[in-house]
Image (spheres, grey):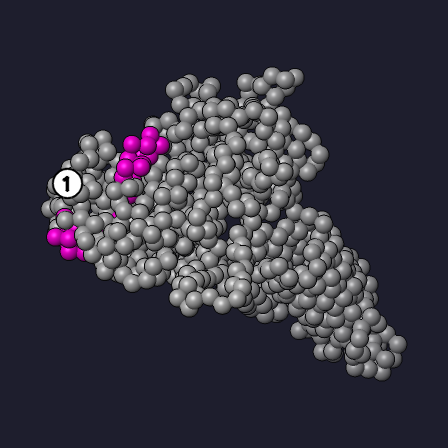
Amino acid sequence: MKHLRRRSVHFPGAIPRWPFLALLILFTSCAGHRVLQEPPAFTDNTPPMSAGFYTVHSVIDGLPSETIGSPFLGNVVYLYKAEFVADGKYYSGIKGSFLPHHYITTSLVHSRNAYSWQDGHDEDIQGEIQFSSISQNRVVAAVTTDRNTIEQVELRFYGPHMAPDSMKVIPIAHRGLCYQPPNNYDGIFPANTIPSFEAALASGYRGFEFDIRITRDKRFVVSHDEDLSAATTSHGFVKDKSLFELTNTLVLKSAFVPENKATASEAFIAAPMKPLKDVLDLFLDDPRLQTMVIDVKPDSDENIRTAAKPDLGGLTADQQRKILFLVRTEGAARVFKDLCPYSDIGLEGSIGPEPVEDIEKFYPEAAGLPRGSHNTISFGANIVLAAKSIETSLEMIGKAMELASQYRYKILLWTFAKEWRLDFLREHEFFPDFLLLDIPYYQYALQEMKYVNQKELAIEGKRSVDTAIVNPLYKRMYNTYVADFWYQSGTLLEVTYGQANPAHNGVTGGFAPVGTVEFKLGRSELDKFSPTNASLNEWYIFFSASNSTAVLTVGGETDITSSWRRFGLGRTEGLGYYGSDVTFLPYVSQSLLLANVDEFGGGQGSPQGQIPASDQEVLARYPGAHRLGDRALYGFKAEIVKSFQLTASYETGMVFPRTEFLPWVGSFLLAQVGYRAMDYGLGKFVDDYPVFGPIISMAVRSGYLYCYYLLRRSAMSWPFGGEEPLRYEGLNVGVSVSF
């Protein structure tokens, strides 16, 4: 999507002072925001279609097969109509998901819509898709992959919702589907605006949440912040403005995001601030809407009652059933219970974002509230997962779910943007009635499929076993971890030169340094998972040759010289930063290897081949056979030219004189279990702290592996004993190319 640019304005000759000041105020109020004061006309050039899941059928000899699934798309895709902006105009298009993090995107090409497979960060992958026919319930398309093959498919819609007996949770868009970094870069509208609510319903969400505050003349207006300057063109406070005074206020950006302690940068399109009544009139009778969550910001019970009567007094029973009010006090709960007896009413424990320590306030019996005032528990499970251990989170969320079931309360869990936290809920079978999400629905669509009985999706209206669609997420683990990596990665070629210092605890003499030339061949994947962060994943085989004569520095005259060769299999993992000019990726690489030691020799100051007898006895165990070993590299890659990287690393490695298989396997598994457990925690840490998280991650991973290396210097299978290994440490520099 192109960023919208403001045109420069020139003032010829002299102009009166007051217009200049007015223009200056207008400019400064919008400075730094990519907004349009007057949204451009919408252009809808895409045929009607339903938002939801489509089954995939291959087209053979011009006829669609009845068999579900295709090699490229799998069994199920999720499609919906979407809006986008280009050249100052709105356009409609299609978006959808087929694997996690990937979707069909839309771009404007020569006044027509063009579609291609892309990942979540606008990087083209895997090919293009052309739609030859789009109707409400059927889509015919030709998929072209980067293997230069074309697959004709027909997508059949089977209902906007999954079967009622399969669905366990209602997805609610937090503040609408809005531009809200770092959770959602896909939206083009600011939060808490009518366009963001429409975008949520158009993308398949079954509801949206928004915040309301009370104006000076005691009316409800949609606003998260009391301070208008936080996200709008106005200044001052909502409570000091009349509803009429706010009619020309534009919302420019998304408001404060509690979990990330950050304010979203500019939205792409400004949208007017609206009174509550306009939102109710526009959406309550919309058949796409199942639940509208209204977060009533704190105020006196008297003011809340006065503001609520004009907007809510005339709602029908069916309209009331679509509303869930979130309130802070029993008095406010009673206000909405009296006005809307058919609505759901939830209690937020304390004023403002609830601290974890006050979690008991979410429980009705702990707060001592009468049962008649509300029927929903609003629970900040995301805050618990962010601030507490997994064990504590499991206990707290489990308690909330237990109380909800015990007292027949509905439960709303909020607000989720990270997939591992959704996985946590699913794995422990925490299925709330409502789940507030900060992510675009195309990413959540596949997550939603995890919340179904027996891991199956049933075609609506059909219940036979033959028509059940097996959830592809559970069938495609191989694709996710093996096939997709191979398909999305590029060929890796890397050449390095290094100098290392061998050592052995059982050798009395010193070793001369060795120079090493190494070649790597493998696959490399660079995943840009946020606007500034990227992950590096590489698998490779390598071959290296080391010799004491290929060094830049010369050892002592009596140092033991050596010559050896190594080959093996390795993996590189890194988290770092990328930008338009440079990509910087700290990494850790681990390898298993076989070493072939040619010979050890005496130094220049010793008689030819003279090595002390005790040292000869130790070193004689290495030549003549391939010896098992391992190594770790701690380094970074810097990409200045696309696909061309400079690399530097520090290396620690070992070669074993003999291998006692079971102790060695035990030591290796122990190291990896600890490393992977630490890796899980570090991954969450980087998600929450993208600025310095990669550096901390690199330091902790490197420190862990280096400490394990130190423990094994005297016993190669520590803590299970083992002999002293031949080890080496050194620096490497080189270049790598991926294509």
Query: Magenta span covers which residues?
Result: 280-305
| Amino acid type assigned to the residue bearing label 1 in the image | Leu
Residue 271, percent across and down? 39, 48
Nearest the camera: 156 or 635?
Answer: 156
Tell me the quarter of the picture where residue 16 sits: bottom left
Vertical relation: 389 (above or below) 153: below
Q: Residue furthest right?
A: 608
Name which residue lies at 34% across and 39% down.
207
- From the viewer's perspective, tell me whether residue 129 is left or right of residue 251: right
Regarding residue 120, the answer to whether it shows in the image is no
| Residue 139 visible in the picture | yes
Residue 356 left/right relative to 369: right
Quarter location, residue 668 = bottom right
Q: Which residue is mark 1?
A: 339
Let me know if residue 408 is in the magenta part.
Answer: no
Image height of 615 relative to 150, above or below: below
| Few, some or many residues within 10 Å of mark 1 (<14, 14–19, 20+) | some
